[in-house]
Image (cartoon, helix red, strand yellow):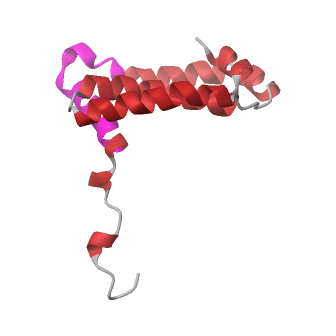
Amino acid sequence: MEENQSPQALPQVRDNRVLFGILSMVSTWLRSETYTHGFLIIPITIWLVWQKRALISSCPLTPNYLALIPLSLAGIAWMLGYLVDVLVVQQLALVSMLIASFLVVMGWRLFKILLF
């Protein structure tokens, strides 16, 4: 970094809106007993994917560019949720964006294998 560059020019974590959405979900899991099962989702998902590793390794990646449409719609929904400050819309759209991005990258065949 140059000496005359100001610290404001550097990207800051607080400006990452998607990270804020993830942290707000984790915060809800920590505060509410109703949602504490959220911490089990990632380890269970990893275990389920591990169980299907043979099928996954035999299936080629064939990107599905049509899935960019639902990915874009989920992104628009997230932006609208952000603009009106409704966390539940942002969180639902964030999860939808994650699922749609997997479909874009992996394609239908691999996506169907990973459906639990």
Query: Which residues lie in the magenta part?
Result: 19-38
Task: Give coordinates of residue 35: x percent, y percent.
Answer: 27, 17
Which quadrant of the rendered structure holds the N terminus? bottom left
Query: Left or right: where does residue 96 sit relative to residue 111?
Result: left
Residue 86 picture location, percent across and down: 22, 27
Q: Toward the viewer: 6 or 54?
A: 6
From this view, report whether residue 85 is shown above or below residue 11. above
Is 86 within the magenta? no
Magenta stretch: includes residue 34: yes
Depth check, front residue: 66 or 42: 66
Task: Assign the C terminus to one quadrant of the image.
Answer: top right
Residue at image position (31%, 55%) is: 13
Q: Main secondary structure of the magenta part?
A: helix
- Residue 78, position in %: x, y? 36, 31
Q: Could you tell me which residue is drawn at 43 percent across and 33 percent down?
A: 75
Q: Is 66 on the left-hand or right-hand side of 32? A: right
Q: Nearer the viewer, residue 3 or 37?
A: 3
Farthest residue, direction left:
31
- Give percent across and percent down for residue 66: 65, 26
Q: Is residue 102 above or below residue 33?
A: below
Q: Is residue 74 left or right of residue 64?
A: left
Residue drawn 52% across and 22% down? 45
